[in-house]
Image (tube, grey):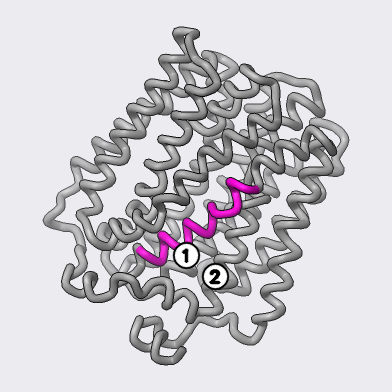
């Protein structure tokens, strides 16, 4: 919700796709600066307490920006600076939040919990534009961002009500002995390398729906925020259906399944760039959203379930780093390309960049795509 509303206020202030790309870069660059630190924190400190701190700062940042907009004193640098701060918060929050799932449920229910967590997170990621677009159309951009900020209070309440005595907390001595081995662990796992390659190219070029939909709505179809919100709803329909059936694909979730679903997503995104009417573009978005969510859930679940729990937080930090790493470079190019070549051509190029490199990497490692029979640190590193 927050990112979409930030993007909309940038369009209102500048009417520039280039500034939109710069905004996205500023959201991602600080994320990259601290994400590996976030993975270390996830394995070293009390996760619940860290999440209370990160969500408190997220509340303050969003409410402040909302108030600046409502009082009509907002400037473009306010938006950019607060987007940068939000990126720092996210970089700490994400690996901690994802690895916290294991402490909530323990090993016996971990597979189902990871699937549910991935589903809810990614469903929210795509439901956000629909909710945000509707709030912008009815209440305005400032209230939409402020409401998003207030929503973090519910997360804080939930965290504070968790009974810490019932958490499945890992032995800290074991954690300390494994710090620093995560990079070697990932390098020794070709299956994880391919999954992270899929995430890199999707994160860099494919999952920028807020940019694609805003520019298609305003530049290509000449419509307003209500129509932009409708496109978000269309995406949300697809992701909601994908979330409902994701558990049915659990037995298929593997590196090969991640590759297959990412290719399907790329084809659908490419097809969307050729559709000439708002109605036809809106019609394909549920399928695009379903394919995107299916791919991300499969990638996240496969990574967590096949990683030694002692370094899961650090591996998730690397996973999130790779997922976001290309975005700061790609988003300014996407914004610039939309102005120079057109948004349709830019979407088509992004779809090809999401698909072709992944196919090349998967073909090169085609005989090494299966997870190891033993995912322990000792086995994987000694095998390498």
The percent coordinates of residue 136 (x first, y second) are 56, 19
Residue 323 magenta-highlighted: yes
Say which mark, if any, is on residue 63. Answer: none
The vertical placement of 196 against 37, above or below, is below
Identity of the residue furthest to the bottom in this view = 383
Is residue 174 left or right of 213 when viewed as pictured? left
The vertical placement of 156 against 116, above or below, is above
Labels in figure, total? 2
Q: For residue 133, which quarter of the picture?
A: top right
Q: Residue at x 34, y 86 (%)?
A: 378
Name the chief secondary structure element in magenta.
helix
Residue 210 magenta-highlighted: no
Contact between labelled residues 2 and 1, with CB atoms less than 8 Å apart: yes
The percent coordinates of residue 179 (x first, y second) are 29, 70
Secondary structure of residue under mark 2: loop
Residue bearing the label numbered 1: 301
The percent coordinates of residue 366 (x first, y second) are 67, 82
Crowd tier of the residue under label 2, counting other residues whose Cα lies within 10 Å: few below 14, some 14–19, many 20 or above: many
Q: Which residues are magenta?
A: 314-329
Which one is in front, 252 or 144? 144
Residue bearing the label numbered 2: 253
Q: For residue 8, which quarter of the picture?
A: top right
The vertical placement of 154 against 380, above or below, is above
Q: Residue at x 46, y 89 (%)?
A: 384
Secondary structure of residue under mark 1: helix
């Amino acid at each position: 919700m927050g990112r979409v509303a930030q993007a909309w206020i940038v369009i209102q202030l500048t009417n520039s796709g280039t500034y939109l790309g710069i905004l996205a870069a500023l959201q991602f660059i600080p994320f990259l600066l601290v994400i590996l630190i976030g993975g270390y924190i996830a394995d070293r400190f009390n996760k619940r307490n860290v999440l209370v701190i990160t969500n408190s700062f997220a509340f303050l940042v969003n409410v402040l920006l909302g108030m600046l907009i409502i009082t009509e004193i907002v400037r473009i640098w306010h938006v950019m600076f607060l987007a940068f701060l939000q990126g720092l918060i996210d970089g700490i929050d994400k690996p901690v939040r994802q690895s916290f799932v294991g402490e909530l449920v323990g090993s016996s229910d971990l597979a189902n919990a990871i699937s549910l967590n991935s589903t809810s997170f990614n469903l929210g990621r795509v439901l956000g534009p629909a909710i945000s677009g509707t709030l912008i159309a009815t209440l305005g951009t400032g209230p939409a961002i402020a409401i998003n900020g207030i929503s973090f209070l519910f997360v804080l309440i939930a965290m504070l009500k968790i009974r810490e005595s019932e958490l499945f907390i890992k032995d800290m001595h074991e954690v300390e002995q494994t710090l620093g081995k995560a990079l070697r662990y990932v390098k020794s796992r070709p299956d994880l390398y391919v999954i992270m390659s899929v995430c890199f190219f999707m994160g860099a070029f494919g999952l920028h729906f807020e940019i694609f939909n805003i520019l298609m709505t305003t530049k290509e179809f000449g419509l307003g925020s209500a129509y932009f919100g409708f496109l978000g709803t269309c995406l949300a329909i697809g992701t909601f259906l994908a979330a409902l059936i994701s558990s049915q694909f659990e037995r298929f979730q593997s590196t090969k399944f991640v590759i297959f679903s990412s290719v399907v997503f790329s084809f659908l995104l490419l097809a969307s760039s050729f559709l000439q009417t708002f109605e036809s573009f809106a019609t394909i978005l549920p399928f695009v959203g379903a394919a995107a969510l299916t791919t991300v859930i499969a990638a996240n679940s496969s990574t967590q379930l096949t990683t030694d729990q002692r370094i899961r937080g650090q591996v998730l930090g690397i996973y999130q780093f790779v997922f976001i790493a290309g975005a700061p470079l790609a988003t300014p190019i996407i914004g610039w390309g939309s102005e120079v070549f057109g948004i349709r051509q830019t979407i088509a190029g992004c779809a090809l960049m999401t698909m072709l490199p992944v196919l090349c990497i998967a073909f090169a490692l085609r005989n090494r795509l299966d997870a190891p029979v033993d995912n322990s640190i000792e086995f994987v590193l000694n095998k390498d």
